[in-house]
Image (cartoon, grey):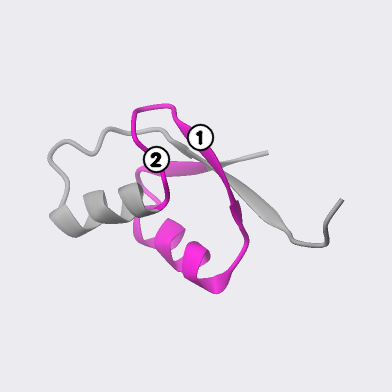
Amino acid sequence: MSDKKTLTVKLVRSVAGTRQDHRATVRGLGLRRLNSERTLEDTPAVRGMIDKVAYLVRLVG
């Protein structure tokens, strides 16, 4: 097992009707559809992206 910490992010609200840059941020996190999940490395950049679209995503586990 590696030492790198990870975060699992799930898209829980639709991006329809949201700002263009927020949609781009969701795509940048690798989330495509509602309820899709991605496991990402816990970095300040990823944390910032999650904070920006916190109303659309949820941390899992």
| Residue labelled with disc 2 | 31
Q: Amino acid at mark 1?
A: Glu
Query: Which quarter of the picture shows residue 31?
Result: top left
- Which residue is found at the position 83% from the left and 62% from the top? 3
Task: Give the left or right position of residue 7, taking residue 37 as reference.
Answer: right
Please, what secondary structure does the residue beneath circle 2 have?
loop
**Compared to 39, does 12 lie above or below?**
above
Please, what secondary structure does the residue beneath circle 1 have?
strand
Kindly indicate whether the residue at mark 2 contacts the one at mark 1 (C-beta within 8 angstroms).
yes
What span is colored magenta in the figure? 29-58
Task: Give the left or right position of residue 25, taking residue 19 as reference.
Answer: right
Q: Quick one: 56 or 30, which is closer to the camera? A: 30
Residues packed near mark 1 inside 10 Å, few (<14), some (14 to 19) or many (20 plus):
many
- Which residue is found at the position 41% from the left and 62% from the top? 49
Query: Which quarter of the picture shows residue 61?
Result: top right
Q: Position of residue 46 (x, y in %)?
A: 50, 63
Q: Position of residue 15 (x, y in %)?
A: 23, 39
Q: Spatial distance from mark 1 to mark 2, Cα to Cα?
A: 7 Å
Instruction: Please report whichever mark, 1 or 2, sits nearer to the chain's N-terminal start.
Output: 2
Magenta span has 53?
A: yes
**Compared to 22, does 18 lie above or below?**
above
- Which residue is found at the position 44% from the left and 57% from the top? 50
| Residue labelled with disc 1 | 37
Q: Position of residue 11 (x, y in %)?
A: 41, 36
Magenta span has 38?
A: yes
Q: Quick one: 17 or 6, which is closer to the camera? A: 6
